[in-house]
Amino acid sequence: MNTKVFFVVFIAVLGIGITTPFIVGAQSPLLPTITIGASPSTVDRGSPTIISWNTVNAASCYGLGAWSGPKATSGAETTHPLVDSTYILVCNSGFPGQYSSAHTIVRVNSFFQQPQQSPIQQNNVNSSLAVTNLVLNKTLNQSTFTNSVEARETDTLVFEIRVRNTGASLTDITVRDILPKEIFYLGSTTVNGAAVSDGIAGAGLNLSSVVSGQEIVIRFSAIVSIGIGQTTVVNQAAAINSSGFSNSGFATIILKGEGQVLGVGDIVTGPENVVPWALAIGFFATLFIHLVFFRRREETVNIASELETEIRKLRTEENPRSLRF
């Protein structure tokens, strides 16, 4: 019977001791087997999906693509994708060069233009009830609400409606927002910071009373639809009372086409294709991990070839659209 000799090699990388076992005279270890999937595999923008995976013969795993960082050898993770996303899992058996990868794709429903709602006519305006309609572009990391913003398709906007009573107490007030057809309601409606049932862009939110001097702050999110082109639209927020009066506030959204400048310093050069960038980053990250932890430069060519094959498979399967985060 052949005697199997085990050597333990300690490699110091960035001051960290890493132990890698090498087996002399033994059979090569089995490659890891990975099973990964998403449930559901198609979601609305920002809605949750669960990525679950299991492995066999895996000692460690790492996420690439739409997620990143070390992953358990089996588990589940909830994500909220905004665009079509590819989740790649790379696992190693614990031996140099013994790795496998697998992936799953989550599709995100597109938001196209919706039917235009009829504007609310201002009748019997109550001068003591002020309605202010403001907006910011969350995609551009804006933090200040203004009455006018610039945006492109798939940008996420946050609207803020302020209803202030400077006169006698009022009761039974309904606040509605009339979104232009180019903007799609996403939800996340709050009243004075507290989450409430969605309805601001539909039948409206009912305020049982607004006392003298009180201000109600309503916020919600929306997304710019796909295929809009260049145009300017107006969003109307209205406070309506059962006795017949209605007051409104307006916010302007300047919609830009691809390749146009969004404000000072925000330069857009055209459609972004996220998938090739994610794959490229994943490719180099995997090479880096392999070289740092195993120092087996002679295997780099094989790894690069296998990863390039994986990338070609992903590109064939993905068929990416014009995407933006």
Image: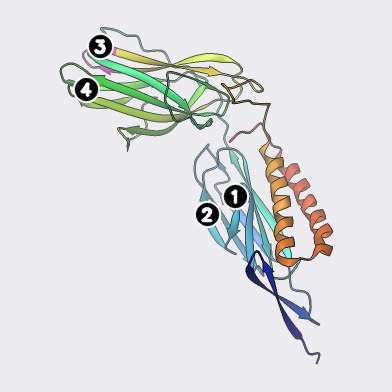
Q: Quadrant of the N terminus?
A: bottom right
Tell me the tag on residue 67. Answer: 1
- Residue 248 visible to the viewer: yes
Residue at x-position 57% and y-position 24%: 152
Left or right, 40 with respect to 117, comes to: right
Local SS, label 3: loop
Q: Earlier in the sequence, mark 4 or mark 1?
A: 1
Tell me the tag on residue 245. Answer: 3
Image coordinates for residue 323, horizontal then vertical, percent? 63, 33
Mark 2 and mark 1 in contact? Answer it, CB < 8 Å: yes
Of all residues, the one furthest to the left in this rendering is 168
Which residue is identified by label 4? 172
Q: Is residue 245 magenta?
A: yes
Report the span colored magenta.
240-246
Mark 4: give few (<14), some (14-19) or many (20+) Cα within 10 Å.
Answer: few
Q: Earlier in the sequence, mark 3 or mark 4?
A: 4
Q: Earlier in the sequence, mark 2 or mark 1?
A: 1
Local SS, label 4: strand
Disc 3/disc 1 C-alpha distance (Å): 51 Å
Residue 103 position (above or below residue 184): below
Depth order, front residue of 67/37:
67
Which residue is identified by label 2? 77
Mark 3 and mark 4 in contact? Answer it, CB < 8 Å: no
Classify residue 71 by image quadrant: bottom right
Type of amino acid under label 3: Phe
Q: Earlier in the sequence, mark 2 or mark 3?
A: 2
Q: Is residue 61 magenta?
A: no
